[in-house]
Amino acid sequence: MLEFVDAHILTILILFPVVGAILVALVSSEDRDLLLKGTLGLTLAEFLISLHCVYRFDEGTAAVQFGERYRWIPEWGVTYCVGIDGISLWLVLLTTFLTPLVILSAWHAVEKRLKAYLLCFLLLESTMIGALVALDFVLFYLFWEAMLLPMFLLIGVWGGQRRIYAAVKFMLFTMVGSVLMLVAVLWLYFEHAKVHAPSTNLLDLYGMSIPFQAQCWLFGAFALAFAIKVPMFPLHTWLPDAHVEAPTGGSVILAAVLLKMGTYGFMRFAIPLFPEAAEYFAPALCALAVIGIVYGALVSFVQPDLKKMVAYSSVSHLGYVMLGLFAFGLCGAQGGLMQMLSHGLTTGALFLCVGMLYERRHTRLIEDYGGIATVMPHFAILFVIITLGSIGLPGLSGFVAEFLVLVGAFGMEDRRFAIIAGTGVILGAMYMLSMVQRVLYGPTANPKNQVLKDLSGREIAVLAPILVFILWMGIQPGTFLDRSAASIDHWVTERSDYRLEFRPVRTARGEADGEAAAGAEFCFTPLPLGENRVRVGEEGRQVALPPGPSPDGEGRRAGHDAH
Amino acid sequence: MADSLHWIPLLPLLGALFCATVGRLLPKICSGVVAVLAVGFAAAVAFGSAWHVHEHGAIVSRMGDWIAVGPLKIGIDLAMDPLSAVMCAVVTGVGFLIHVYSLGYMAHDAGYRRYFAFLNLFTFNMLVLVLAKNLPLLFVGWEGVGLCSYLLIGFWFEDPAKASAGKKAFIVNRIGDAAFVMGMLLLFWTQVQATGVTGGSLDFSDLQEKRSLFETTSWGGWTVGTVAALLLFVGACGKSAQLPLYVWLPDAMAGPTPVSALIHAATMVTAGVYMIVRMNFLYTGAPAAMAVVAWVGASTALFAALIAITQTDIKKVLAYSTISQLGYMFLAVGVGAFSSGIFHLTTHAFFKGLLFLGAGSVIHAMSGEQDIRKMGGLYRMLPYTCCTFFVGAAAIAGFPLLSGFFSKDEILWAAWQSPRGGPALLVLGGLTAALTAFYMFRCAALAFLGASRASEEVRHHLHESPPSMVLPLLLLAVLSVVGGALGLPHALGATNFMGHFLEPVIVSPVEIPHPHTALAELGWMGAASAVALAGMGFALWLYPRKLALAESWAGSWRRLHALSSNKFYVDELYLLFVVLPLRAFSFVCWKIGDGLMIDGAGVHGIAGAVKGGGNATTSLQTGNVQHSAILLWAGGAVVLGAFLWLGGFA
Amino acid sequence: MIPLEHVILLSAVLFGIGTVGVLIRRNLIAIFMSIELMLNAGNLAFVGFARQYAGDGAHAVVLFIVVLAAVEAAVGFAIVVAMFRNRGTVNADEVNLMKG
Amino acid sequence: MPISPQDFWCSSPILILCGFGTLLLIVDARCGKGPRDLLPIAGLSLFGLLAAGAAVLLLWGEFGSGGVAPVECFTPMGGMGAAIRCDGYVLVFDAVFLLAAGLTCLISLGYLERMDLRFGEFFALILFATAGMMLMASAMDLVVALLSLEVMSIALYILCGLARTDLRSNESALKYFIIGAFSSAVLVYGIALVYGATGSTALPDIARAASRIDFARGDLLLVGSALIVTALCFKIAAVPFHGWAPDAYEGAPTPVTAFMSTGVKAAAFAMFARIALSLFASYTIPATEVLWLIAMLTMIGGNLAAVVQTNVKRMLAYSSIAHAGYLLVGLVAAVDRRQTDGSVTVGTPDIAFYLIAYTLMTMGAFAVVVWFGRRRREYLLIEDFAGIGFRHPFIAIAFSIFLLSLAGIPPTAGFMAKFGLFRSAVATGHTDLAVIGVLTSVISVYYYLRLVVLMYMRETETGITPTYSPATTLAIVVSGYGVLHLGLFPGSLWRLAEIGAQTLAW
C-alpha cells in the first residue's frame, strides 16, 4: 500500500480536490455549515497527504521524486509526467497549507453563492498543484491556463465594484504571455524532434544544445510569460486591480501561490532550458527586478487603499526573488526560494488581516481606520508581527530570505543591484510602518472604530499557523533549506547542461530501473477501432514510445506513396 | 559558569515571554517582579562569567547552525571575551537598576505587563548583540534592539506624535542597518573571492585573521577594509545617533523615562561604539575610516552641545547631552583609544542613567511637567533626587575625581596625543567639555534651585519618589562617584584596570604616549578640571538668580538663540529634502508611471487599437451585397496579381 | 479555323463584361443576367480549348454548366420573387437591413 | 471501364442520403402542417443519417485503415479521369458532415416547431446538402467538384431563405445566392483555363501536367488557379472574400447558421485541401505565399471584427471566419510541405481534427443559443445572456465550456486542435503564422469570455427563459462530452485523421 501511495502520490494530490469538488457539488447550497465543514475537511486531508511528500522526501538527491510518467497523446509524443524535487516541494506545501486557512477565513465572509466559491477554491488548488508538479510542457500548459479560470471567476463573481475590469485584465495579461510561450514550446519541440523521438516531456528536452540566436528568442517568449506572472516591473499593473477587487480568500491565494508560478517558471523552465540566453539577459532582468523593488516600495508608500498597498509590496518582494534567481549563485537561488515561501506566508497573512478588517468595517481605505490597537489588541499584536516578518526583521522569515538574496546578489560582478536592493529594505520599513501607524496607532477618532470587536477564536486559528511558520523559517531555516539544497545546488552548478531524471524507485522487487518502474505502460487513450489494424504495419520504432508523426512524416508510411 | 553563557540572553527572553503570555492572567505585579528577577539572575550569571573570563580568558558557547547555505555558514554562537564581559556587566547591571526603578515609575500605567515584556525583550536583544560571536548574529541583536526601541518609544501609541516618533526611530535605524548589511556582505564576498567557495566566514576571530586580506584587496578605488569600515560606521551612526542620523534620538524622548534611561542613554546607543571596538582590527587597518569616525564624533559632540544649551525640556537637554557624550566615545575610538572609549561608555551609563532616572523622578513628582522653566525650588521637596541629580551633573561635567572626569580626561588626552588625533580635535573636545558643564548645571539649577515657578496646583502635589525609585538613584550616584576607579591613570599610581582588562581584545593597538612625568599629568588634569569648573561656575552664577540677564542675552543674539533652540532646523531640512520629494516622486510613479504610461498608453492603448481595428473591419460590411462583391473581386484581383507576379510571369 | 487566341480573348471579354455587370447594375434581375453571361464565357473558353485536345470530355462539361446555370436561375428567381413580395422592390441597394 | 458494383458500394453513403432525401419529400407531401407532424420526418432524416454513418464505418473498415488501396469510381469511358474516390480522407470528412447534419437536425426540431417553420423540406434539404458535401470531399475531378459545390450551395440558399416572411432570412438568402453564383461563375472560368493549360480536368492529370518543368502554358495555369483559389476562398469565407458571411449567418434560421458554419466550412476545406495539394503540387505556383497572406488577413480581420459585435449570431459568424483563418494556417503548412518534399501527412490531419473539434464546439454554442428562446422569439443580443450563470447552472457551464473551447483554453478540444495546427505550422517553419495565430486567439479570448462574464458576473432580475426540447439538450450533451473528451484525450481521433490523410495523395 505504501509503495502504491509513493508511486502515485502526486496524481492523488491533483485529483483529490477534483473528487472533493464533485462531492461538494452534490451538497445542497442551503446547507452552509456542511459545505464549509466538508470543504475544510477535504483541504485539510489534502494537506495531510502533501505532508507525506515532505516526510518521504529524500534530501540526498537532486533527482525528481514520486515521479510518474505515462503516455498521454502518443501521436504527438505528449506524456502525462509529474514529479517533485527540491524546487517545487515547498511550493506545493505552501499551496496545501494555505488553502484550508483560506476556507476557514471565508466562514462568514462569503454570503452569496458559497458553494460555487468553495468549488472554485478546490479546482484552483488542484490546478495549482498540477502546474507545480507537471514535468511535461503540454500538461504544464494545461494546468497553467486552467488555473486562470477559477481565479477569473473568483475575482469576477465575488469581487468589488470594478471586478469585471480587473478579472478580464488579469485573464488577458496572463494569456498574452502564455500563448507566446506556447509557440516557443512548439519551436523547442521540433528542434528536439529533429534528432530524437518527438516528445514534449521536460526531462527529454533538458540538456538540448540550441543555437544562441534561437535561444534568445525562446528565452524571450518564456521570460515574457513568466515576467507577467511574477509580476515584474513594467508588466505589473494587473496585480493591484486583481488584488483590490478579489475577495479576501482569492487575493490570499493569488498573492501566495499564483505569483510564485512566474518565479517557479523561471526556475524550472526558462533558466535551465536556455542557459546562455539566461546569462545574456541576466543584467537586464536584474535591473528590472531592482527597479521593481524600489518602484513597488515607493508606490505602495502613497497608496490610500490597504489592499492595493499590499499588492504593490508584493511587486517589491518578488523583485527580490527575481534578483536572487538571476544572481545564479547558490545563496541567491536558496534566498529566492525562501523569499517565495516567506512572501507567500507574510503577504497571505496580511491579506487575511485586511480581510478581517474589511469584514468588520467594509472599507479598505486607510484613513477610515486609526487607533485599532486600543480596540482590537490581539489583532494589533498579530498584525504587527506579520508586518515585521514582511519587512524582514531578523528572527522572522523575511530577513533570512532577503539576507540570502542580498548575499547572492552581492556575489555578482555588478554589485550596484545589491546596493539598490539593500535600499529596498529601508523603503520596506517606511511604507509598512507608516501603514501600521495610520491603521493601528493614534486615537480611535472614528466612532465606528470604537465598537469593533477583537478577533474571534476562528480568526486567530487562521493566523496562528502562519505565524508559527514565519517564526520557524526565521529561527530555524535549516529545515526548509536542507530539503531544497540538493536540487538548488544541482540547478546552480549544472546550469549550462541541466538534466533531470527520475529517482530510481526501490520497488519490492528491488528493480531500480527508474524509467520502467515509473513509466508504466498505462495508456490513458482507449484503443480506437482501427488501431490494431495499423500496428500490423511496419511499427519499427521501440514500442515504449511509439512516435507521433515526426515532422518529416517518415516511418509508418501506409498505402502507396505519392507519385 | 563556563557553560552557562547562553543563560544570560535566555533569561530575559523567558521573562519577556512570561509577561507577554502567562503574565496577562496573573496580577500586574507578578509580571514586574518576574521581569526584574529575570534581569537580576542574568546579571548574576553575567558577573560570574565576567569573573571567569577575567580569570581564565574567553568563553565560547555554540548552539547549533542558523543559516548554512553553500559558502555562507552562520552559527548561533555566543562568546564572552573581556569586551563582552564589560558590556554585559553594564547592560545587566544598569538594566537591573532601571527595571527596579520602573516598578515604581510605571506602577499606575495600564500597559504595565506590555512594558515589562518589551523591556525584557530589549535586554535579550542587547545581550545577543553583545555576546554574538559572528557579525550576522550581532546584526540580529542590532535590529532586535531597534525593534524594541520602536515598540517602547511608541509605548503610549494613542498619542500620534509618540507613535510617529517610534516609527521615525525605526526607519532612521533601518537606514543605518542597510549600510551595516552592505558592509557585512562586502567582508563576506571579499573572503569568498579570495579563498574560493568554502572560505567565507563572518566570525570575528576569522575576520581578525583575514584582516590583512581586507587591507590589500581594493574595490572602487579604496581598500575593502576602508569601505567596509565606513559602511559599518554608517550603521553605527544610525544606531548611536551620530551626526547625519541623530534626528531620531531627541524625538525618542516620547517614550517612558526609564526607557530613555536604559535604551537611549546606557545601552542601545552605545551599541555602535561596541561594534567599532569589536571590529577594531578593521579600523586600525583603515586610517582614513578612523579619521572619519573621529571627526564625525567630535563635530557631533560640539553640535549637540550647542543645541543642548538652549533646550527647555529637561529630557531634550539630556538627550542632546547623550548625543554629545556619544560623540566623545566615537572621538576616542576614532583616535585609537579603544579602551578609554569603553571606559567612558561605562561611566556614561552610570551618570547618564542617573540623570535620566532623576529627571524621571522630577517629572513623576511634577505630575508630567517637563519644561524646566516651570520648575525650580525642588530641593526642598525632592532632597534625594536633587542630591543625586547634582552628583550626576558634576560627574558628567567632569568635576575632578568623579568618574566622568577620568574618562573624559583620558579621551581628551588621547585626542591630542594620538598619532591619529590632533590639536584641532582637542579644541573641539575641550569646547564641548565646557559647554557640557554649562548646560548640565543650567538645567540642574533651573530645575532644583531658586524659587519654584510651578503652578499652585502642581506645587501642591510635589512629593519625593517612593523608595523603589530613590534606591536606584542612590546606587547609581555611588557608581558615578566610584566609577572612575575602573580606569585611574598611571599618574595617580594605579594600574589602568579597564585598559589592561581590554588588552587582549585590541589586536594592533595605536601607540598613545603617556604623559612623561607625573607633573605633566597633574598639570593636564588641572587644566581639564579648570575648564569644567569654569563652565559650572558660570552656569550656577547665571541661572537661578540672573534669569532676566539670560533672557536679555538671548534677546540680543535672537537669531543665534533661535537657531540653536530650533535644533538648527535639521528636522525641517530632512522633511524638505528627503521625505517630501520621496512622497512626491512616489505619487508621480503611481499616477503617471502606472496610471498614464503602463496602464493608459500600454493596456488601454492596445485595447483601444483592437476596438478601432474592429470598427474599421466592420465598416467594410456596408450590408450592400454589391459592396461585398466588389470586395471579393478586389481580393480575387490581388490573388491573381500575386500569382502572376510571384509565379514569374511579369 | 478561328485561332485559339481569338476565342479565349472573346471569352475573357465576355467574362469581364459579366463581372462588371454584377458589380454595377442595381437591378437584381440584371445581376442574374450578368452571372449567366459569366457562365457562358466559361462555356466558350471550354469549347475553345476542347478543340486542341482529343476526347469529348470538355463538351460534356459544357452541358453540365448549362444545366447548372438553369438551376441557379430557378433558385435565384425564387428568392427574388420572395424578396419582391416582402419588400416590393428588386433594387440591390435597398437590401441592407443587416450591416456592421 | 464501365460502372461496376464496387463504384456504387464506394459511393453508398451519398446514395443513401439522396435516397432518404427523396423519401422524405414524398413522406412530407402526405403529412399535414400540425404541431407534431415534424417528428416522423425528423426521425426519418436521423435514421437516414445513421444509415449513411453505418455505411461510412463499413467503408472505413475496408478502405480507411490503409489496408486496401483507395478505389476510384465512376471513371467515364472516354473522359478525363475518375469522378470520385473513396479513401480514408473522404471517410473521415464524411463522418464530420454526418456529425454536423445530425446535430443540426437535433437542434432544428424544437426550433422549427417554435418559430412556425414547419417545412418537411428542411430535413430533406439538410440531407441533400450533406450528400453534396460528401461528393465535394471525394471529388477527383474539378468539374465534379464544381457540381457538388453547387448541389450543396443550392440546398443552402433555400435553407437560408426558409423563413419566407422574415425580411432578414430573405435578405441573407439573397446575399448568399448572389455572391455564391458570382464565385461559382469565377470557378467555372478558372476550371476552363486550367483545362486549357493542362488538357484535363482530372486532378491527377493536372498534378502530373503541372509538375513538368518545361511547362509552356504556365500563365494560363496561373490565372486559372488564381480564379479557383478566389472561388474557394469565398466558400470558406476567408477575409477579403467574407463579405457575405456575417449577413448570411445572422439572417438565416439559427440551425441553418450552425449547419453552414460547421458542415459547409468542413466541406469547403476538404475540397480546398484536395485541390490545392494537387494543383499546387509543383513549385512553379506560389500558392504558399498567397495562402499565407490570406490566412494572416483572415485571422486578424475575423477576430478584430468579432470584438465589436453585439449580436451573438453575428459574433459567432465572425468567429467562424477567424477559425477559417486558423484552418488556412494548416493548409499553408500542408501546401508548403507538399511543395517541398511531396508528403501530405503534415497539416491535413490537423485540419481534419480541427474541423471535428470546431464542429462540436460551434454546434454546442448554437444549440445553447437555440435552447434559449420562446414562441416566435429568439434571444440574440449578447446582453440577453446576462445573469444566467446561476439561474441555469448546467446550460451556463456547457456554454462556458464551448466558449472556452472556441477561445482555445486548454482543458478543451479547441486547445488541442489549435495546438495541432500551430504544431504543423511551426514544423514547416511558419512560426510567424503561429505567433499571429496565438495573438489573435488572445483577442478571441476577450470576446468569448465577455459572454462568460455576462453570464456569471452581471446580476439581472428578469433573465431569459428557455423552452425545454429534449433534442437540443441531447445535442448540447453530445457536443459537450465531445469537446471535453477531445480536450483531454485527442490522441486516438487524431490518429484516425492521420491515417485518413495518408491516403490523400495519389
Image: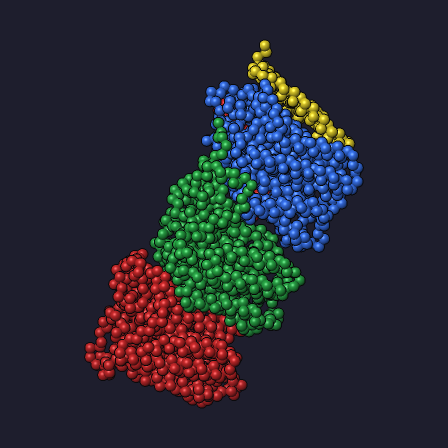
Chain colours: A green, B red, C yellow, D blue
Q: Between residues B405 and B223, which one lies in front from this camera angle?
A: B223
Asked if A490 appears above or below B535 in the picture, the reply is above
Q: Between residues A124 and D437, which one lies in front from this camera angle?
A: A124
Q: Residue at x 59, y 63 (%)?
A: A38
In percent of width and height, residue D8 lies at: 62, 28
In percent of width and height, residue D87 lies at: 56, 32
Picture quadrant of residue D52: top right
Picture quadrant of residue D142: top right
Q: Residue at x 46, y 41 (%)?
A: A547
Q: Residue at x 57, y 57 (%)?
A: A19
Name the side, left or right, on which A312 lies relative to B537.
Answer: right
Name the side, left or right, on which B438 lies relative to B598.
Answer: left
Asked if D203 appears above or below A455 in the picture, the reply is above
In percent of width and height, residue D297 lies at: 56, 36
Picture quadrant of residue A395: bottom left
In percent of width and height, residue A346 lies at: 49, 64
Q: Residue furthest top?
A: C1
Q: Is residue D472 visible?
A: yes
Q: Residue at x 43, y 60 (%)?
A: A57
